[in-house]
């Protein structure tokens, strides 16, 4: 491997080693595999452009363009032109993801989940740092300043970690930087040629090719160590003076900006990003368990937080004032005494591994007995931990109301308060018009807000042909809801978000609640709530009843009695009915929205009812266009790295089989032109010169650069010495050189021997003495393949010259390739 090739590899490795300091900040850590793959592709592009070679700014510009294309494919493929080319929509998507990622970074606890925004920050940041390191260390040959971006990468990790980055991550990053410095020092030394300062030392197998024999290497190595020591010292000092960031998701932050002892605000973030991960966990780990005196647990949803702010792309909780937890919580808003309620006592125990800053509570809670530092947010009626308080091992008792309105009470609900309606019916201007038009179409014929809500719920859960799928990408941006309404596949986040947004377009106050479904019964009478019980549902406001739960997600949870359209207008919840959530048998009173048991609905095992329209996956068929596109892209990605190998094999076969000169031979003059060069048109001359070209390119592939100024004998002597060829291979190389001299200088050239065998013998000798890395490089990425780029450059120069485009020709001459080796 050439010196610049080693520098390229070391620059990429040093960047990844420094990026390892970010691993403890998020989980899972699989993002670094994606970053490593994309960084490798950017490094390969840089190596290829430098081998052409292009002007330094052009090389960096090409790498930056490839970085943009890779990030577009990875994060904004749906908004890209043809799935690859970035356009205005791609940059808007990047802006939204970066804003979300910045908000998540500031508010999530460590380790934070890898949201789309955080993943873009991580992967994009590593690529940009890698591009800067590659440009400084390889393109501009200045490895020492390349430590600054590496230092920035490590310092970010150290600053974000509450306890600073661990010593192991510092050691890994430091080793990466020192590796880069040593590689650069050796590369600079090799540019002076072989140094004769006494007996050469045998290369160490542990040196990875970075050591160089001779005393001349001592000074650059010592300088590199000094630079590394200074840089590492700075790396230790800088993180120490940076503030450590904390808080997050569900690490809500409270601040003391309020007035009086109960003042303060809660600045919460979107907790739904971890909901999909919870639902897709292979093991349904228990989050909490509880015991209740409720006659039925089907409506005992454990609510964590209410999301009331809708910006067109997602729902999240507003920033609210928090107070001390009162002995008795205030009455729920909008609840009239005429609505039937019953008091329920529930004792909850959270698991030791479950650390959440919001306390899961039945809604509406009227009293909470719990120890620790908890605050109360009145608008959402939630309890949030203060100063690091979490639910870990928490045990608490909750008194709550089981509200059982009738369909008639909901249908006759009056108009909500003007202020509440104004706040909870806001929709952004960016919301696609199809959301409101679809809501109007679905609720056509409804005479009141209650009937509109039921029609929306039934359309999502049974009548609209939607399917439940937790593997669907949640998406982001204003078009996310529109895409969901078209594709009709998603999980509870999609259904709750969409129904709440559509309800707002109809003038119905709406928000989204996040929490858990009631869970499953145990033999001892307690209920167990696991990760797969994580859920989101819409809450709609009806004056006289208050915030009311609906269930639009098919096969999940249970539809409340008051939301079943066939329910008698005066009927309510029967306190004596069996507990559906504890039975594995189908419901005793099936309805269009309840076609299987609640347990099956809860875990998502219930299939789509036979009568549901569009429930089968065969309606749209396989997405052949997408499959073929991705297959073609995958084949292209796999084919590009092997193109140099394929070209080199084909060229060697043609040269040694008498197939005539190749494209590379046609555009490069003979290395050793002489007075007999005009006779090189005969068959013997063609075979001899083709064999000579293959001999020179074979040495080039193994790191012995061609030199046009040398005679054939000088070139062969250099090949024998540099390649450390044995006697047999050396004799074969000299046979080829002698044949070339005959063709170029003899008045009557003698017939050449079987030169193909001699060239193969020399190539085998080079392969035998080369190291493992050099062998792999010669086979997979042969240096002589750059002749193709030279040929294209010369062809394009000819085209420009023929068309008389002098200005373009002058521009091209500034960036066109030379024959300097890499």
Image (spheres, helix red, strand yellow):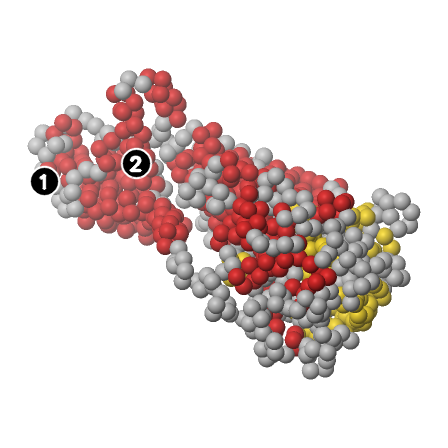
For the point 56% across and 53% down, the residue is 444
Image location (x, y in percent) of residue 392: 75, 64
Looking at the image, residue 570 lies above or below residue 664: below
**Quarter holding the N terminus?**
top left
For the point 77% across and 57% down, the residue is 544
Q: Is residue 497 left or right of residue 201?
A: right
Towards the viewer: 112 or 502: 502
**Quarter holding the C terminus?**
top left
Image location (x, y in percent) of residue 622: 39, 58
What is the C-alpha distance between the residues marked 1 and 2?
29 Å
Q: Residues within 10 Å of mark 1 (few under 14, many from 20)?
A: few
Q: Is residue 558 left or right of residue 797?
A: right
Q: Which residue ends up furthest to the right in the rendered image?
A: 260
Q: Would you name the residue on which mark 1 appears? A: 751
Looking at the image, residue 658 lies above or below residue 289: above
Place residue 395 in its image quadrant: bottom right
What is the secondary structure assignment of the residue under circle 1? loop
Q: Is residue 693 left or right of residue 590?
A: left
Q: Earlier in the sequence, mark 1 or mark 2?
A: 1
Q: Residues within 10 Å of mark 2 (few under 14, many from 20)?
A: some
For the point 26% across and 47% down, the residue is 649
Which callout, 1 or 2, points to the residue nearer the camera?
2
| Badge 1 vs badge 2, beta-carbon distance below 8 Å | no
Image location (x, y in percent) of residue 634: 38, 51
Q: Which residue ends up furthest to the left in the rendered image?
A: 748
For the point 69% across and 82% down, the residue is 523
Towards the viewer: 513 or 32: 513
Q: Would you name the residue on which mark 2 appears? A: 787
Towards the viewer: 133 or 470: 470
């Amino acid at each position: 491997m050439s010196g610049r090739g080693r520098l390229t590899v070391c620059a990429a490795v040093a960047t990844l080693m420094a990026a390892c300091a970010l691993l403890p900040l998020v989980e899972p850590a699989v993002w670094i595999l994606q970053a490593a793959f994309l960084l490798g592709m950017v490094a390969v592009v840089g190596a290829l452009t430098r081998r052409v070679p292009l002007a330094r700014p052009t090389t960096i510009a090409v790498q930056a363009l490839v970085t943009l294309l890779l990030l577009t494919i990875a994060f904004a493929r749906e908004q890209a032109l043809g799935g690859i080319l970035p356009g205005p929509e791609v940059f808007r998507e990047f802006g939204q993801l970066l804003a979300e990622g910045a908000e998540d970074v500031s508010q999530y606890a460590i380790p934070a989940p890898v949201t789309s925004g955080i993943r873009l920050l991580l992967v994009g940041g590593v690529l940009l740092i890698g591009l800067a390191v590659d440009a400084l260390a390889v393109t501009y040959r200045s490895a020492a300043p390349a430590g600054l971006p590496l230092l920035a990468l490590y310092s970010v990790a150290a600053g974000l970690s509450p306890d600073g980055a661990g010593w192991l991550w510092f050691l890994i990053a430091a080793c990466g930087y020192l590796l880069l410095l040593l590689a650069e020092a050796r590369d600079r030394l090799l540019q002076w040629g072989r140094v004769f300062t006494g007996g050469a030392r045998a290369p160490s197998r542990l040196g990875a090719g970075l050591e160089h024999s001779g005393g001349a290497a001592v000074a650059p190595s010592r300088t590199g160590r000094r630079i590394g020591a200074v840089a590492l010292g700075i790396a230790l000092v800088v993180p120490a003076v940076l503030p450590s960031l904390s808080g997050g998701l569900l690490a809500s932050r409270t601040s003391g900006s309020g007035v009086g002892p109960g003042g303060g605000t809660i600045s919460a973030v979107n907790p739904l990003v971890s909901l999909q991960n919870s639902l897709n966990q292979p093991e349904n780990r228990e989050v909490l368990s509880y015991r209740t005196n409720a006659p039925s647990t089907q409506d005992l949803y454990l609510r964590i937080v209410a999301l009331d702010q809708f910006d067109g792309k997602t729902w999240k909780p507003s920033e609210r004032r928090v107070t001390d937890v009162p002995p008795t919580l205030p009455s729920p808003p909008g609840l009239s005494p005429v609505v039937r309620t019953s008091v329920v006592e529930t004792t909850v125990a959270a698991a030791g591994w479950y650390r959440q800053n919001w306390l899961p509570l039945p809604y509406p809670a009227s009293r909470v007995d719990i120890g620790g530092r908890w605050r109360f947010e009145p608008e959402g009626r939630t309890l949030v931990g203060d100063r690091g308080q979490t639910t870990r091992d928490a045990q608490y008792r909750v008194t709550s109301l089981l509200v059982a309105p009738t369909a008639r009470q909901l249908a006759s609900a009056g108009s909500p308060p003007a202020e509440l309606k104004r706040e909870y019916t806001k929709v952004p201007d960016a919301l696609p018009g199809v959301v409101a038009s679809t809501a109007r179409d679905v609720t056509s014929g409804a005479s009141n807000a209650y009937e509109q809500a039921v029609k929306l719920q039934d359309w999502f859960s049974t009548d609209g042909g939607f399917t439940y799928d937790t593997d669907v990408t949640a998406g982001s941006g204003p078009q996310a809801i529109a895409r969901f309404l078209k594709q009709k596949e998603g999980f509870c986040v999609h259904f709750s978000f969409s129904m709440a947004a559509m309800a707002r377009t109809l003038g119905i106050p709406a928000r989204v609640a996040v929490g858990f479904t009631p869970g499953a019964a145990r033999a001892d009478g307690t209920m167990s709530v696991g990760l797969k019980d994580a859920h989101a549902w819409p809450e709609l406001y009806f004056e006289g009843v208050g915030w009311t739960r609906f269930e639009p997600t098919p096969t999940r949870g249970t539809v409340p009695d008051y939301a079943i359209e066939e329910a008698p207008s005066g009927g309510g919840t029967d306190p004596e009915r069996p507990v559906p959530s504890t039975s594995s048998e189908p419901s005793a009173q099936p309805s269009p929205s309840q076609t299987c048991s609640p347990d099956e609905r809860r875990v998502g095992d219930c299939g789509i009812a036979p009568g549901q329209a569009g429930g089968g996956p065969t309606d749209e068929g396989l997405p052949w266009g997408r499959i073929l596109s991705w297959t073609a892209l995958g084949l292209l990605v796999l084919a590009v790295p092997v193109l140099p190998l394929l070209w080199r094999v084909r060229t060697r076969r043609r040269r040694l089989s008498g197939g005539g000169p190749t494209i590379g031979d046609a555009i490069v003059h003979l290395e050793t032109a002489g007075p007999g060069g005009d006779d090189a048109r005969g068959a013997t001359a063609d075979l001899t010169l083709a064999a000579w070209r293959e001999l020179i390119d074979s040495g080039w592939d193994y790191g012995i650069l061609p030199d046009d100024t040398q005679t054939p004998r000088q070139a062969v002597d250099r090949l024998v010495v540099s390649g450390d060829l044995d006697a047999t291979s050396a004799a074969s190389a000299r046979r080829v050189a002698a044949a070339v001299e005959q063709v170029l200088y003899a008045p009557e050239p003698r017939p050449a021997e079987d030169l193909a065998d001699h060239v193969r013998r020399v190539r085998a000798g080079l392969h035998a003495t080369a190291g493992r890395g050099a062998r792999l490089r010669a086979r997979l990425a042969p240096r002589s393949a750059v002749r193709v780029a030279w040929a294209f450059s010369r062809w394009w120069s000819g085209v420009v010259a023929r068309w008389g485009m002098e200005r373009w020709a002058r521009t091209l001459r500034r960036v066109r390739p030379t024959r300097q080796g890499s």
